[in-house]
Image: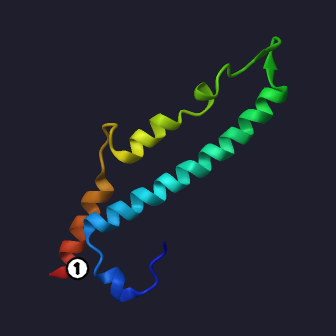
Amino acid sequence: MQIEDFNEIARLTIPDYELRMKAYQLKQLDRQYEIHLQAWATVMAGQTRKGKPIFRTFDKFFDYRKAEEKILGRQKRTSPDKEKLQNWIANFNS
């Protein structure tokens, strides 16, 4: 759901923003999955190395769970963007 009202955007809290961003990223992940699945079907239909498929399983070709864990924060990563956003909001509000 897109927000087009600037008043509603102004009332958006950081947790709400983060939740919306996570939902958007998961939606993009599903799109990537579909693209990779189509590519996988194409690969399986014709790509071989010495008569054997290059990727033996779809998970070797595209690790959906690993990408999902990264988005959901279950995989350790740094988030300088979150800190920048919080600093910007603090400066904006003062």
Quadrant in the picture for residue 46: top right
Q: Is residue 36 above or below residue 15?
A: above
Which type of secondary structure does the marked residue at label 1 adopt?
helix
Quarter holding the C terminus? bottom left
33 up-or-down from 94: above or below: above
Residue at 72% from the left image edge and 20% from the top image edge: 54
Which residue is at the far left?
Answer: 94
Q: Residue at x 44, y 79 (%)?
A: 3
Q: Quadrant of residue 8?
A: bottom left
Q: Is residue 51 above or below residue 9?
A: above
Query: How many other residues sit within 10 Å of disc 1, few (<14), some (14-19) or many (≥20)?
Result: few
What residue is rendered at 32% in x and 57% in y?
Answer: 81
Name the amino acid, label 1. Phe
* Left or right of 53 on screen, residue 6: left
Q: Position of residue 49 (x, y in %)?
A: 78, 16
Using the image as rendered, state which of residue 78 and residue 61 is in the foreground. Answer: 61
Query: Residue 30: x and y, percent?
Result: 57, 49
- Write down the residue under mark 1: 92
Q: Quadrant of residue 77?
A: top left
Q: How many marks can you see? A: 1
* Furthest-top residue in this view: 50
Along the line of sight, the residue nearer the viewer: 47 or 45: 45
Residue at the front extreme, as displayed: 1
Percent position of residue 34, x then y: 65, 46
Q: Is residue 80 above or below residue 93?
A: above
- The image's colour scheme reads rainbow
Question: Residue 72: x percent and y percent?
Answer: 37, 46
Q: Could you tell whether 16 is left or right of 45 in the image?
A: left
